[in-house]
Image (cartoon, helix red, strand yellow):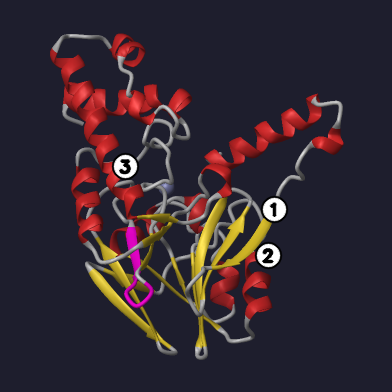
């Protein structure tokens, strides 16, 4: 469940409880395609609470994450084909998590080459290739894709939200697409499953040092916002550093998990998505790091 889905669920409940249904704003449709302002050919496809970037060129399309776990990929393919009849040449996986990369088969069937980080291909071989189709090409530290006049850099900045996260950068457009670890005004999701601490902070610094102005994350932010700025990354780094320092102190003072989770407050981030339910879970992740080195 993404933060966006959660928000939509809340909207639905509110709607059901309100007698004057007419006063409610209509729920957003399950999918949408948005051209990124100021670009010639960069699009965001949203599928309920997940989103992907795709790039249209005269020689074909570079698609990213199929975002079709337990649902058909057809709406995504249809959305691309509504913009262009050019063939899908690539489908690039952002990281290893199935909710983002399941559903790649129809893209491959149409001739798309799938590209992943090296460690992810190894993982797919071990885990569940029935859900996620195997990849054709791999990225070690960097790979440059050039298609129809567009250049897309695939960068590996080491471990963070997973061990296989790519930072996809459009150098001309100064846009990056990277998923799940630089959210728009939100704390980290639940217990930060699969996140490497403290590597995630080092990784963030590498991303901040890159040349880009806008970020497309894997989920919309508050109010359905789909794009952020570099501030999202600098703010997220500040959040993780503040969280880490607060938990380190609590562990040093001999506080228990329960007391640390109850007592640590980070009011600077109170207005962020997930602060209420997920801050204690984020604290638990850092507690494990400072208490047991894991
Ligand atoms: Zn993820």
Q: Nearer the viewer, mark 3 or mark 1?
A: 3
**Residue with the mark numbered 2:** 75
Could you tell me which residue is drawn at 53 percent across and 49 percent down? 220
Q: Earlier in the sequence, mark 3 or mark 1?
A: 1
Across and down, in percent, residue 156 comes to: 26, 62
- Whether pointer 2 and pointer 1 mark residues with C-beta atoms closer than 8 Å, the reply is yes
User: Which is the main secondary structure of the residues drawn in magenta?
Assistant: strand
Q: Nearer the viewer, residue 66 or 44?
A: 44
The quadrant the N terminus occupies is: top right
Marking on residue 236: 3
Q: CA distance from mark 2 to mark 1?
A: 10 Å
Find residue 273 and report its horizontal and vertical position in percent: 47, 35
Q: Earlier in the sequence, mark 2 or mark 3?
A: 2
- Residue 145, disc: none
**Label 3 within 8 A of ligand 1 by Cβ:** no
Task: Give the CA separation, mark 2 to mark 3.
Answer: 32 Å
Q: Residue furthest left?
A: 252
Q: Say left or right for 272 vs 87.
A: left
Instruction: Assess whether mark 1 and mark 3 are in contact (beta carbons under 8 angstroms).
Output: no
Other residues around mark 2 within 10 Å, as few (<14) / some (14–19) / many (≥20): some
State the quadrant of the C terminus.
top left
Q: Which residues are magenta?
A: 166-173
Above or below, 179 relative to 24: below
Q: Secondary structure at mark 1?
A: loop
Q: Residue at x 47, y 24 (%)?
A: 277
Q: Which residue is mark 1?
A: 30
* Gap between marks 3 and 1 measured at Cα: 28 Å
The residue under the point 50% across, 80% down is 40
């Amino acid at each position: 469940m993404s933060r966006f889905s959660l928000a939509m669920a809340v909207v639905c409940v509110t709607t059901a409880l309100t007698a004057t249904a007419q006063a409610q704003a209509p729920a957003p449709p399950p999918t949408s395609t948005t051209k990124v302002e100021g670009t010639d050919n960069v699009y965001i496809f949203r599928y309920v609470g997940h989103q992907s970037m795709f790039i249209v060129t005269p020689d074909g399309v570079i698609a990213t994450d199929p975002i079709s776990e337990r649902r058909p990929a057809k709406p995504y393919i249809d959305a691309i084909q509504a913009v262009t009849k050019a063939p899908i040449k690539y489908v690039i996986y952002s990281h290893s998590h199935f909710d983002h990369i399941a559903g790649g088969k129809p893209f491959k069937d149409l001739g798309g080459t799938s590209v992943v980080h090296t460690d992810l291909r190894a993982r797919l071989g071990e885990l569940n290739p029935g859900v996620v189709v195997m990849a054709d090409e791999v990225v070690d530290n960097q790979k440059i894709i050039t298609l129809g006049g567009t250049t897309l850099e695939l960068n590996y900045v080491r471990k963070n939200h997973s061990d296989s996260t790519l930072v996809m950068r459009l150098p001309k457009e100064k846009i990056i697409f990277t998923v799940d670890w630089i959210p728009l005004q939100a704390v980290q999701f639940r217990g930060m499953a699969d996140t490497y601490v403290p590597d995630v902070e080092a990784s963030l610094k590498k991303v901040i040092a890159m040349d880009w102005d806008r970020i497309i994350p894997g989920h919309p932010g508050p109010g359905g916002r789909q794009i952020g700025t570099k501030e999202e990354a600098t703010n997220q780094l500040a959040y993780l550093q503040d969280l880490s320092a607060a938990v380190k102190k609590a562990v040093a003072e001999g506080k228990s998990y329960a007391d640390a989770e109850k007592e640590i407050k980070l009011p600077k981030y109170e207005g962020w998505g997930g602060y209420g339910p997920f801050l204690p879970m984020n604290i638990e992740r850092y507690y494990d790091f400072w208490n047991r080195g894991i």
